[in-house]
Image (spheres, coloured by chain):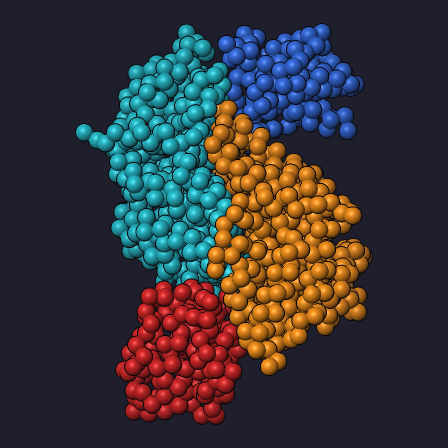
Chain colours: A blue, B red, C cyan, D orange
Amino acid sequence: MELDSLYQQVILDHYRTPSNKGLSAFKDIQVHHNNPSCGDEVTLNLTMKDGVVKEITWDGVGCSISMASASVMSELLLGKNYQDSMKILDAFVELMQSKGKSSGDEQLLEDGVAFAGVSKFPARIKCALLGWMAFKDAATQVMA
Amino acid sequence: MELDSLYQQVILDHYRTPSNKGLSAFKDIQVHHNNPSCGDEVTLNLTMKDGVVKEITWDGVGCSISMASASVMSELLLGKNYQDSMKILDAFVELMQSKGKSSGDEQLLEDGVAFAGVSKFPARIKCALLGWMAFKDAATQVMA
Amino acid sequence: MSADLSRYKRDFPIFSRTVRGGNPLIYLDSGATSQKPEVVIEAEAEFYRSKNAAVHRGAHLLAEEASDAYEGARENVARFLGAQSSEIIFTKSATESLNLLAYSFSNPDSGIAVKSNDEIVVTEMEHHANLIPWQQLAKRTGAKLTWLSITPDGRLDLSNIDQIINSNTKIVAITHQSNVFGTIPPIKEIVKAAQAVGAYVVLDACQSVPHFEVDVKQLQVDFLAFSGHKLLGPTGIGVLWGKAALLDQLQPAIFGGSMVDSVTMQGATWASGPRKFEAGVPNMAQAVGLSAAVDYLTQIGMNNLAQHEHKLTEQLLSGLKLIKGVKIVGPTDMKDRGGVVSFTVDGVHPHDVGQVLDQYGIAVRTGHHCAWPLMKKLQLVGTTRASFHIYNNSSDVVSLLEAVEKVTDYFKVGK
Amino acid sequence: MSADLSRYKRDFPIFSRTVRGGNPLIYLDSGATSQKPEVVIEAEAEFYRSKNAAVHRGAHLLAEEASDAYEGARENVARFLGAQSSEIIFTKSATESLNLLAYSFSNPDSGIAVKSNDEIVVTEMEHHANLIPWQQLAKRTGAKLTWLSITPDGRLDLSNIDQIINSNTKIVAITHQSNVFGTIPPIKEIVKAAQAVGAYVVLDACQSVPHFEVDVKQLQVDFLAFSGHKLLGPTGIGVLWGKAALLDQLQPAIFGGSMVDSVTMQGATWASGPRKFEAGVPNMAQAVGLSAAVDYLTQIGMNNLAQHEHKLTEQLLSGLKLIKGVKIVGPTDMKDRGGVVSFTVDGVHPHDVGQVLDQYGIAVRTGHHCAWPLMKKLQLVGTTRASFHIYNNSSDVVSLLEAVEKVTDYFKVGK
Ligand SMILES: Cc1ncc(COP(=O)(O)O)c(C=O)c1O
Ligand SMILES: Cc1ncc(COP(=O)(O)O)c(C=O)c1O
């Protein structure tokens, strides 16, 4: 069923047991992003050192796609330097805009390729990007 | 031609040489009425004595229908008592609303029956009524 | 036995298409916007094809016919509401209606302008469109905004009504039916409380006028707003109704052609009646389309429609109660409620519920329903909402219930 | 030789009807509203028949398709104007566009709010829709309204432009083409004067965008407004364009659903981009219809259309000059003017002129054309106005000229 291409098992797993959820006490910066049309929200704490992501923690409310995507993002970008994190982020954004035509670079995106099916559901792309955009905002501010 | 039923000779004559046009120096009351959608305007001075119309003078700018109708009205209602003037006025209003189905009571309306054709042109009914409504307003105020 | 209304569905061309998964369309989102019968679509098209002209302006036959069509629509809508046609103002939507009214209330030249010591009362279950315009009016004028709370079962809490609606109250703006719960608040009591202190009642009738008979005289409210698009009518048309005597005392809020009495470079004066609130070339084709929708509904009979929706709502409520993990948000019985049903599924976000339903061709609304303060109060991130109109039937309800079961399976609710 | 555009008339179903006296319709009132080609009528109908749903809200396929259609319309209109789509705000009409803008300018939270020591400049040839909203803005804020005058031949008098547009000037609101004279004012010089003092230029493009190519970047104005219904599009849709950086600094003027970032009972914050100015379920079908009109015009070619109207205007001006008792009001040559021609007939009121023309099936506009201050300045009670669009041709002009001759006969002008 078409639905299974959206709700990959990886996504449902991350939704049920998200990684790095729960905000850390210390951080370089905190950002809050939301999606007013559906009410999804993510708060993200970021710590970087020498241009490398040291800690990402987040909290939020939202649908399976937005929460799972934030979880995957937080795993994937941890330990990456700023440039690499942006490369991965760009690849993820590109995948989201692929309208179902790309399956994603597994090398780069790892669990992130599970979201390939989201690109066929335009209304859900914003969900998948919520956590990533919060990271981008935070990292850009820390690096500025 | 349909047009001739609108522009009766009587109307064109009154338009070219209107009666009682030019405001008197004395009056019981002055009213100003206009038709904002086409810009037609009538100012009317009324003098009554013992409930009888002693003088109607008016001035204004507007189309042939509105000016001729004001002229006919001023002739017709002069010398009438309040009640009779309202009877005539009501008959004229009724004629205007007749959608071309009435030819008007010549006994009562005299030259006013020339406006029967106006009732077939909804956009012009307001023109024909402008002067009459000014009279009604003025007379009602004087009688109050 | 009630009338069989199943034949009406055929009048709506959209049901001849299929949606996701090749499924027939099961449209349960009429609370957001309704579908349109062909007669409405054709009425609008026919206006363009045969009598399109700027109303009230031209000296020609088309302009005359267009004006007749537009003013005829006004009379028709007035009749539908038990109002006078001079009290019907065409706007683009209920949102515009409510904003225009709020701006008119802050025009200092209005005879009934809101002042800084006035209070404006809303409720916790208002749609943003009947909340934010009043917040902004309060901000512009210095007036105070207060509100009636809701009870846990989604009804209005009237326990402190005498404090909330008090001698300072100028306006009470309230929904006629909650677009989240389906609750129909006790308008009579609120009108009574408002009248006792000389306050004006503004009724947001977006979810009522399209679904059951509404008579402004019986209701005794002062202003009322709704949108055409939820009433089987076109988009881009709304209505603001107000008591003639009050409209007379209000100054207009939007300015331009066809609403003036006279104009100089320095200033202007206004025409009388609804004209002064309708600046510019109006949404004529949409007014004509709305009028066709009113005719269509009148022919069905608003009471028949209300009964029809009542039965479907009852069926849905009983069905939902049987599904494990599903909670109805709002009244669970049929007392004072209409055909809008919100629910949550344990552990599944509404957005995901909606996505699964969509896969089965079922269109519902998910999220905060433009009633964010209400969601926060209920500590919900949102709900899934099903809402009805004439084209729905009991097999739609069965399909929805089956699909909700599948949602709980898919996301292994309680497993 | 220019392209033959005669085949386009067939696309407009209204011309298959007859009017007064059994005559074919000769429609010369496009300045008030244009007729609609079948593709526009069908685009609106098709939206209702196949993808009607509330945009940006539903979790279902229809809502997705409706959103795509609506946002696609926005992109299409943006392209047409040389703008970004995030700068296009859909309103119900130019009148609403200008009023919303004026209200946004008086929202004290706006970064570029109008203050009491500011000046707002208009011209003596503005339509009421581009005059009264600014009068009212001045009244609300205490700002001063000033204006550029006109010359006897219906052009803008720029002799004192440096006094009128001065260091206190905040807004210059001006028409792109007079709806009475057809005059196209020297926008370049006005933009230069405004930029020199840091004032914003608001262009009323109601009579330009539907008739010739308009590129907002080339014009260098800051805001622009027009209505769909004069552009072969549906009624009930208008556009407000503004530079993105300025829209960012403006606060919205109408409030409700789909335009918020967050909402509590006490207050709200706004979404970004055009969304913050589009509260409520929008006029979706009308936006889609407008987009179809834009496609239709693009396919004809705006330059072809402009040339076509230019030729007709030239023919009409030369013809009118030959009729005794007829005076053209406005420029009598083709320099900087479009396809709107006003005239008077000695001793015959415009209303009577229009009535006679109507008898011959010719639809024109008569009266003050919502430009009352201008009429008073010219000491006219009104004019008769003929205006063109794609469906007109040179035999329409011949018919009009013949009928005007008949007017002078009928009322025995000069006899
Ligand atoms: C120059 C001009 N400005 C503004 C308007 C107002 O447009 P609308 O009535 O469509 O809002 C018009 C047309 O009526 C116009 O010709
Ligand atoms: C209760 C209620 N009020 C107001 C509105 C606003 O209506 P619209 O968006 O058509 O202006 C809606 C619908 O969205 C509603 O359900």
Residue in view at x 76 percent, y 25 percent: A143
The image shows residue D398, relative to residue A106, as above or below, that is: below
Residue C97 in the image: state x and y as whole percent: 45, 49
- Res B90 quadrant in image: bottom left
Q: Is residue C202 visible?
A: no
Residue located farthest toward the front when viewing the structure as drawn: B1
The image shows residue A118, relative to residue C390, as above or below, that is: above
Residue in view at x 69 percent, y 65 percent: D319
The image shows residue C55, relative to residue C320, as above or below, that is: below
Residue in view at x 46 percent, y 78 percent: B9
- Res C29 quadrant in image: top left
The image shows residue A72, relative to residue C273, as above or below, that is: above
Decide which of A113, A121 is in the foreground and name it: A121
Labels in figure, total:
0
Decide which of A61, C91 is in the foreground and name it: C91
Relative placement, left or right, of D118 versus C401 is right
Residue C159 in the image: state x and y as whole percent: 29, 42
Residue B105 in the image: state x and y as whole percent: 30, 77
Decide which of D309, D193 is in the foreground and name it: D309
Residue located farthest toward the left when viewing the structure as drawn: C1
Q: Quadrant of the C terminus of chain D?
A: bottom right
Decide which of C47, C162 is in the foreground and name it: C47
Residue in view at x 71 percent, y 45 percent: D4
- Res D348 quadrant in image: bottom right
Relative placement, left or right, of D332 versus A34 is right
Q: Is residue B85 visible?
A: yes
Residue B29 in the image: state x and y as whole percent: 41, 85
